[in-house]
Image: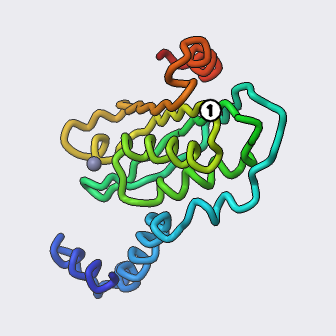
Amino acid sequence: MAEAAKKLLQYIGEDPERDGLVRTPDRYAEALLFFTKGYSEDIHEVVNDAIFEVDHQNLVLVKNIEIFSMCEHHMVPFMGKIHIGYIPNNRVLGLSKLARITEIFARRLQVQERLTQQVANAINQVLQPKGVAVVVECVHMCMVMRGTQKTGAMTTTCSRIGLLQDDQETREEFYTLLNVRQ
Ligand SMILES: [Zn+2]
């Protein structure tokens, strides 16, 4: 990977041997491996034994989990917030695990639409809740830094499963608590 990064430096007209760049290929490789560490993570290992039986069937909503991912079309970052809601079926997940599950899918080359769907599907799979809704709001560096340079443009994607898709009242409760328009 470092060799490839060194080539890239040459292709953009840089001198990979100059002082500031000597260790850059190594650092770049290390950073890229971190940004894509989700490939080597497994949902079941992450969730482990953090599922708890609880007599609770009302909406659980965790808002504003920070998210950092990489656009698969340009290999540059996109970042923002993810909001996750679910209706438990007497089983809840340790709250920190929602962020950990998000990381598995965010730390890969992604498109925001698929990331949103994968997080919703994963929670649905491990928890078998009555419903799941995931909203992702991100700014994409490939939009901000090149071409159109729409610095304020935020992309919102949403994925809903079960009651949070089919039942209007439940869906409205989710969006009211989320305080975003549907
Ligand atoms: Zn892109």
Looking at the rendered structure, the secondary structure element under dot 1 is: strand
- The reply, left or right, for residue 25 in relation to residue 92 is left
Residue at (34% x, 83% y) in the render: 2
Quarter of the image where the N terminus is located: bottom left
- The reply, left or right, for residue 80 in relation to residue 29 is right
Q: Viewer-proximal residue, 113 or 6?
A: 113
Vertically, is 117 above or below 153?
below
Vertically, is 77 above or below 59?
below
Q: What percent of the width, then of the height, locates residue 22?
A: 36, 85
Q: What percent of the width, then of the height, locates residue 88?
A: 70, 34
Q: What percent of the width, then of the height, locates residue 4?
A: 26, 81
Q: Viewer-proximal residue, 21 or 84?
A: 84
Residue at (40% x, 82% y) in the render: 26
Q: Amino acid at mark 1?
A: Gly
- The reply, left or right, for residue 133 in relation to residue 145 is right
Mark 1 closeness class: few <14, some 14–19, many ≥20 residues within 10 Å:
many
Residue beneath label 1, please?
85
Vertically, is 147 above or below 71?
above
Residue at (28% x, 41% y) in the render: 143
